[in-house]
């Protein structure tokens, strides 16, 4: 036992280099520990915790979720919309506990944020018929390479083939093309900067070191050397019974100076936040006014629908079509007409032009502007000289008719 106790005491010499390193190390403090904790933030910053990033992603998700989903069939003269139980299932209640809008919003939001570019939905079928689309939380899903070109989807520890689940991938990876990468790399530093700006603003606004008045007193006087004496000074001279009451102070003992406290404008915090917010808008490809920067612009909004909303919607369309439909003539399509910004005057003018050329029925025109159909407005109308080209010579005025 004596030998064991000696061996336990020997390692104390090994701690000497650590003591030397701690003695030689140095730290420089520019503020108190309390202020340092208030004005700094550390640790992992989730993209969903940034108000600017979350606002942009929510706008994208809500717009895609608001579009109706049509089941279409390829035809010889154009695509035809089909209305059956499958189209109703996808467009109305894809999940038994969620409507289409919330279901699509969940997919898009998690695909961009928590899923890091990947979201999985499990289609529950019975005898070949679709029963339910079950959204799988990203935390329960992983994607494992299988061989050189294939992969497996792991859901809560259970292995699935990619053709058995819906896998929505955003921004394909360069090494694994089937894996999405999302925006974490591009937005990670911006999320940290915005979180730091928020912490700085909060700490600055709650800091007590912002006096608007400084009272200079004679510290050699015993009465004012301690905190109790200075408190009595404020109670006697500075604290008035009424708002706006003047101070009466001895001229020989006090000197009152007004100072201008440091503001957030002096820190240029607003400019840095605006710059980072514009960068977030550029990465997400949303107009800056969506994030509160600048004014609304209709052309920018319509371009946003064409270049951001619809490419993301195409990812969902193609995955639904590939995994849920057997017939090669059928496909799903999001209806984006309701997303564009146009006035009622433009709708009326465009509808009138198409009705005059027999390209649109008047009831379809009424549907454009949100009016119910009229049984007397289902016929095609045309002006007298709007006739087929091969019947130009059949006009009555050319063959002697009235």
Image (tube, rainbow, N blue to C red):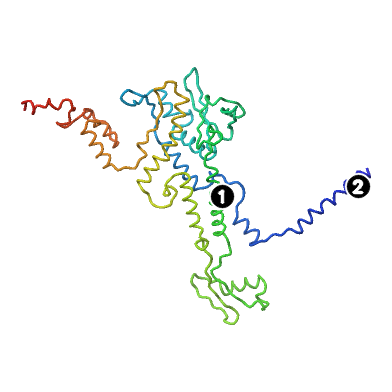
Report the disc number at residue 275: none
Within 10 angstroms of label 2, few (less than 14), some, or many (20 or more) residues? few
Mark-to-mark CA distance, 2 and 1: 51 Å
Name the foreground residue: 247 vs 340.
340
Quarter of the image where one finds residue 21:
bottom right
Residue 214 vs residue 312, the one in the foreground: 312
Position of residue 385 relative to residue 265, above or below, is above
Residue shown at the point (12%, 26%) measured from the top left: 393
Please provide percent x and percent y for residue 24.
75, 59
> What residue sits 45% from the left and 32% below the top?
316
> Residue 145, how many percent across, how many down?
59, 30
Image quarter where the N terminus lies is top right
| Residue 172 against residue 281 in the figure, above or below | above
Splitting the image into 4 quarters, where does residue 37 fall? bottom right
- Left or right: where 338 falls relative to 400: right
- First in sequence: mark 2 or mark 1? 2
Q: Point out the residue furthest to the top here.
A: 127
Q: Is residue 240 above or below residue 389?
A: below
Give the residue displayed 48% in from the left and 37% down from the top. 108
**Image point (50%, 32%), residue name:** 168
Outermost residue, bottom side: 252
Q: At numbered mark 1, what does the secondary structure look like: helix, strand or loop?
A: helix
Residue at the extreme right of the image, as rendered:
2
Q: Are marks 2 and 1 in contact (CB under 8 Å)?
A: no
- Quadrant where the C terminus is found in the figure: top left
User: What x and y, as percent, mark residue 7?
Assistant: 89, 46
Q: Which residue is mark 2?
A: 6
Helix, strand or loop at mark 2: helix
Dot 1 surroundings within 10 Å: few (below 14), some, or many (20 or more)? Answer: some
Residue identifier under label 1: 192
């Amino acid at each position: 036992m004596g030998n064991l106790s000696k061996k336990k005491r020997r390692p104390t010499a090994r701690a000497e280099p650590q003591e030397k390193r701690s003695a030689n190390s140095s730290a420089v403090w520019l503020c108190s520990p309390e202020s340092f904790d208030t004005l700094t933030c550390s640790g992992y910053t989730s993209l969903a915790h940034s108000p600017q990033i979350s606002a942009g992603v929510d706008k994208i998700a809500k717009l895609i979720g608001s579009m109706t989903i049509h089941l279409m069939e390829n035809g010889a003269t154009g695509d035809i919309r089909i209305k059956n139980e499958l189209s109703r299932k996808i467009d109305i209640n894809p999940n038994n506990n969620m409507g289409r809008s919330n279901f699509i919003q969940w997919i898009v939001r998690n695909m961009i944020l928590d899923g890091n570019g990947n979201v999985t939905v499990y289609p529950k079928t019975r005898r070949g018929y679709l029963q339910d689309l079950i959204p799988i939380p990203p935390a329960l899903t992983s994607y494992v390479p299988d061989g050189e070109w294939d992969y497996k989807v792991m859901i809560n520890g259970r292995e699935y083939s990619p053709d058995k689940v819906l896998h929505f991938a955003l921004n394909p990876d360069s090494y694994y093309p089937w894996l999405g990468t999302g925006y974490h790399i591009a937005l990670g530093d911006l999320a940290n900067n915005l979180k730091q700006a928020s912490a700085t603003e909060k700490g600055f606004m709650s800091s007590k070191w912002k006096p608007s008045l400084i009272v200079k007193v004679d510290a050699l006087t015993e009465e004012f050397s301690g905190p109790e004496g200075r408190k009595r000074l404020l109670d006697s001279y500075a604290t008035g019974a009424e708002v706006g009451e003047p101070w009466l102070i001895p001229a020989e003992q006090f000197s009152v100076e007004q100072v201008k406290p440091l503001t957030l404008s002096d820190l240029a915090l607003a400019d840095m936040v605006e710059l980072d917010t514009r960068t977030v808008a550029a990465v997400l490809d949303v107009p800056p006014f969506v994030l509160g920067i600048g004014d609304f612009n209709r052309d920018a909004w319509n371009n946003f629908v064409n270049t951001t909303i619809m490419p993301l919607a195409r990812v969902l369309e193609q995955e639904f079509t590939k995994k849920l439909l057997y017939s090669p003539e059928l496909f799903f399509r999001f209806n984006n007409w309701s997303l564009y910004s146009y006035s009622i005057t433009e709708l009326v003018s465009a509808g009138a032009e198409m009705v005059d050329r027999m390209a649109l029925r008047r009831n379809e025109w009424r549907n454009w502007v949100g009016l119910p159909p009229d049984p007397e407005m289902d016929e095609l109308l045309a002006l007298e000289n709007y006739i087929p080209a091969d019947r130009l010579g059949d006009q009555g005025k050319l063959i002697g008719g009235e």
